[in-house]
Structures are given as C-alpha cells and as structure tokens.
Image (cartoon, rainbow, N blue to C red):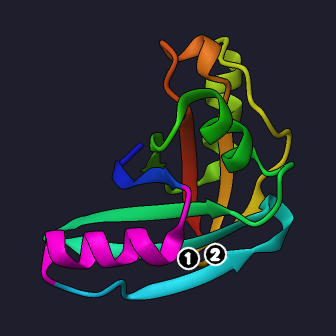
Amino acid sequence: MRKIEHIGIAVKNLETSNLLFEKLFGAAAYKQEEVASEGVKTSFFMNGPNKIELLEATNSESPIAKFIEKKGEGIHHIAFDVEDIHLEMKRLQDEGFILLNEVPKKGADNKLVCFLHPKGTNGVLIELCQEIR
C-alpha cells in the first residue's frame, strides 16, 4: 500500500452534505458520480493532497443505506492506493485477511476496488484502490 487514497463518509443526503463540505473546504466537489452496481452516488473533494468521498445510498439495499441504518452518518471506509490490486489481494489473503470480493470490481473515480472485511481489521472497512490503466 502506497498511501491513503481517500476517506469515505456515508451521508444521508448528498446535496446537503456537498454544501456543508464546500463550506468546510472552501471549494466545490471536483467530481460527482453514480456507481449503480453499489447503489451509491458519490462526490469527491480535495483538501490539500487529501481526497474525501461522500457516499449516499440510491436504494435501501445499498451497503451505505445499511451502514447508516446501523451506525448513522460518518466515516465508512479508508481507501489505500495500491500499484497492483491483484498482487495486493493475494498478499493480504495469504496473511489471513478476509476479502469481501474475490476479484476487483469497478468503483468510482476510475478505480478497481476490493474491500477487506472489518472483522479482521479492528472494525475498519478497508478499501484497496488501483487506477484503471
């Protein structure tokens, strides 16, 4: 893992949250995108070298809807940038981590992604991200 790629924050209302984070950072989201396969709409903000992703559920079966139902709005995951997601997935699986998907899937912001089960990472949902080349 090379660096933190972004921090994901689950929100109930993306429009309202966009306004809040625009005020907080003094800048608008640089990108908004829907990932239908995950049932989410996202907004991305830059804060210096750091990226923040806001996630709103688009249906009640979305992982974000279920997260908010259980825990409320807040930090959902920390994503790490990796050079080769396939190698990193194999390495982590060999180390005993539980992968939530067996193959990388297309995520937001032109990334291939894989999640690690939070039971094996002290309750933190970890996302691996590789830029699609």
Does label 2 or label 1 sit earlier along the sequence?
Answer: 1
**Going 83% across and 52% down the picture, which residue do you hit?**
60
The percent position of residue 16, horizontal first and vertical second, equals: 42, 73
**Going 28% across and 70% down the picture, which residue do you hit?**
20
Asked whether residue 89 is in view, the answer is yes
**Going 74% across and 29% down the picture, which residue do you hit?**
99
* Picture quadrant where residue 88 is located: top right
SS at circle 1:
loop
Residue 109 disc label: 1
Q: Nearer the viewer, residue 37 or 129?
A: 37
Q: Amino acid at mark 2?
A: Ile
**Going 71% across and 32% down the picture, which residue do you hit?**
90
Asked whether residue 81 is in view, the answer is no
Query: Left or right: where does residue 52 sit relative to residue 83?
Result: left
SS at circle 2:
loop
The percent position of residue 33, horizontal first and vertical second, equals: 61, 82
For the N terminus, the image quarter is: top left
Query: Left or right: where does residue 52 sit relative to residue 78?
Result: left
The percent position of residue 92, horizontal first and vertical second, equals: 62, 26
For the C terminus, the image quarter is: bottom right
Q: Viewer-nearest of labels 2 and 1? A: 1
Near mark 1 (Cα within 10 A), the count class, few <14, some 14-19 or many ≥20, is some
* Picture quadrant where residue 107 is located: bottom right
Q: Nearer the viewer, residue 97 or 72?
A: 72
21 part of magenta stretch: yes
The span shown in magenta is 12-26
Near mark 2 (Cα within 10 A), the count class, few <14, some 14-19 or many ≥20, is few
Report the residue marked by disc 2: 132
2 part of magenta stretch: no
Query: Left or right: where does residue 115 sit relative to residue 75?
Result: right
Rendered view: 112 above or below 74? below
Q: Amino acid at mark 1?
A: Asp
